[in-house]
Amino acid sequence: MNATRRMLAMQEVIKRVPVPTDKPENAQVSQYYGSDVFGIDAMREFLSEEAFESIMQSMNQGTTVDRKIADQVAACMKAWAQSKNVTHYTHWFQPLSGATAEKHDGFFEPIAGGRAIERFSGNALVQQEPDASSFPNGGIRNTFEARGYTAWDPTSPAFIWGQTLCIPTIFISYTGESLDFKTPLLKSLQALDKAATDVCQYFDKNVTKVAVTLGWEQEYFLVDAALYNVRYDLQQTGRTLFGHASAKGQQLDDHYWGSIPERVAAFMKDFEYESHLLGIPVRTRHNEVAPAQFECAPVFEEVNLAVDHNLLLMDVMEKVAIRHNFRALLHEKPYAGVNGSGKHNNWSLATNTGKNLLSPGKTPKTNLQFLTFFVNTIAAVHEHADLLRASIASANNDHRLGANEAPPAIMSVFLGEQLSSVLDELEKSVHAGKMSPEEKTKLKLNIGKIPDILLDNTDRNRTSPFAFTGNKFEFRAVGSSANCGGPMTVLNAIVTEQLIAFKKDVDALMEKNVEKDEAIFQVLKQYIIKSKKIRFEGNGYGDEWKAEAKKRGLNNFPTTPVALEAMISKKALDMFESLGILTHREQEARYEINLETYTKKIQIESRIMADMVNNQIIPASLLYQKTLTDNVSGLKNILSATDFKKAADTQIELIKEISERVTIIKKAADDMTEERKKANNLDSAKKQANAYCEKVKPFFEIIRYNVDKLENIVDDSTWTLPKYREMLYLR
Ligand code: ADP
Ligand code: MG
């Protein structure tokens, strides 16, 4: 018999040795960190003082860069890039397809006499017009206005990746609508800066700027490239559509923080080295809960930069993995039955005075400021829980949320026992009308105690989608392949809206001559009461929580099409528009794009599933069935009737089982194809997404269940698909 592709792949895997890394022997990170970034140091070195000051100003204040200065910056960038043997440049942007986009142009320009020179003008740096009519636009761009613009974002430095100078840019349509993740993120930062700075004025007049900080934690799987290459489902959908569970999965909890295999360690070393050259501050690495699952986390940064760095890191990871004969799987759920991958978004607010607004302070005054931002964030999540849920909705994440140690699709906030009781206390002790001096002292004493309590507050609730972790909120429902810019924009927006409302409420009381601190306490109390139902300290994985959440009136949207609807609620549309982050039209387009992406993903999965059933699973099953039937016929020729019955019964059962399962999966695959055709003919993105979710996707389970049973009975040497037990154990 011919060896199956799977067996040939396994032979390759067995021969693997660790690939040597590029990282210079014994070099410390500080020696090469950021050397491929046109960062502040490179700018100071290469730019004139005037140009340097001007760039610093536009970075800090968001002012536009003067064209003359841009020319100078471009020339310097080119000189710097050439000193590193770079030949091309690209505007690097984040279209709504989810991946980053780049189109490389050479620096060289032909000149008279058949010669060429290298050139890079300020114009080429500042703006480009990609002919980009095939990026998702949700109907915003008609073909007659198919041009889009990319425009330089000087707040994120240019960098060299491969042989190309990459310039981070925003991406907008000819008519000015944003077509990317970065534009609304930057707008949300401006809005939040203003609202948060205004609120900070109650506490500290020196605060003139509030920035958002993000520290993401990226989970991912590695699989051997040879096995990946013969799993068409992994290649085309990022996840395994079939696969019988490995007997040993994560039940022994022996992978989490376990020792890292040598081959993997070599990969990590290289990928961290490449990341450090790019100024991505990755610092932490460890094994995750599932076999072959890992995590890396950087030191947090300003959110715009952190988002760019995360996108770049995903790209670096995928490329370096290939060098090491691995494939990095960034999908939220590459394997059924084991942990999925998330990307925890640690979010906080930082002032120009160096204060983390979500870090309790040393005095009652700074703690009142802490409580203000803390309670307002909770209130914002309460008010817009559905929108936050929508911000992390995707076909991929649907598999992860609520399964195998991932937070549920119900949004709630975890505060920890200590802070919960601080809020309860506040609720009890504050009352309308003037407070007595004793009451005030007691209150201040109470909140003055916060830092002490938090220091030994070690309780961590891994089951909450949105948890306070001492000095930041951790949004854990974000999927591993997502652009953090989406959920971060929403979080920034809802907190901005909340802070504006807070200031209005406090000012209104102060106008009625309520003293400032008292006014703040009273408004916070109202918010604490109003947002109570979003707080949950218990086990988010349990079914009791689902029932309890329902009682509380919290929504549980398990699938993307329904979850996305919150994006276009009047409340959401009005909020984004009034804050100047996204117009109705832009937000509606995003909704359409998300629906279309959902539909396409399920469509691709459904098609590849049917292909694999027809080309691989049924043929392998029938091949094995033929071995059995040949054997049974042979037995019949040589045995007496009684002996034959004894000898052949089990085999006949197997033959029948194979026929039954093959019939079921074939029929299901055909019926699924019919449902797909019907869905494709529906006349709106919403109807299509719903049909794919409700009519097409349910076949996945029927098919998979029977295929996985077949995997378990068919001869190992006949089965063509690498198995979970082979893919999940890296050697
Ligand atoms: P964990 O126990 O969740 O691993 P860590 O303290 O290691 O907690 O932090 C996890 C992530 O949170 C890291 O990426 C870290 O940089 C980030 N982080 C820490 N402080 C902040 C902050 N103020 N703002 C944003 N992210 C932060
Ligand atoms: Mg964490």
Image: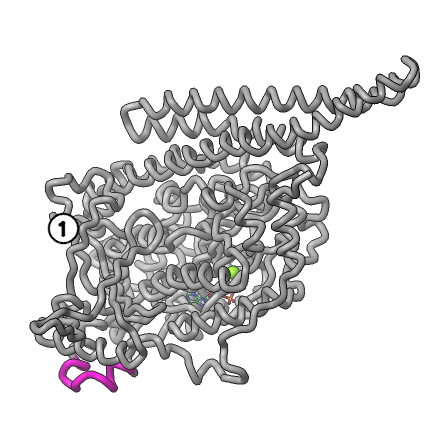
Judge left or right: residue 394 versus residue 39: right
As drawn, 439 above or below 71:
above
Q: Is residue 274 above or below residue 513?
A: below
Q: Residue at x 51, y 24 (%)?
A: 669
Specify the principal SS of the magenta part.
Answer: helix
The magenta segment: 42-53
- Relative depth, front residue between 212 and 320: 320
Quadrant of the rendered image containing residue 193:
bottom left
Magenta-span inclusion, residue 139:
no
Q: Is residue 11 left or right of residue 420?
A: right
Q: Secondary structure at mark 1?
A: loop
Residue at point 15%, 56% (across, down): 129
Pinpoint residue 484: horizontal percent, then vertical percent: 38, 55
Q: Is residue 340 above or below residue 123?
A: above
Instruction: Judge left or right: residue 558 versus residue 184.
Output: right
Is 45 covered by the magenta stretch?
Answer: yes
Q: Position of residue 561 (x, y in %)?
A: 38, 34
Question: Within 10 angstroms of label 1, few (less than 14), some, or many (20 or more) residues?
Answer: few
**Residue at 35 percent of width and 43 percent of height:** 387
Q: Is 5 displayed left or right of 694 in the figure?
A: right
Could you tell me the amino acid type at mark 1?
Gly
Q: Which residue is mark 1?
A: 176
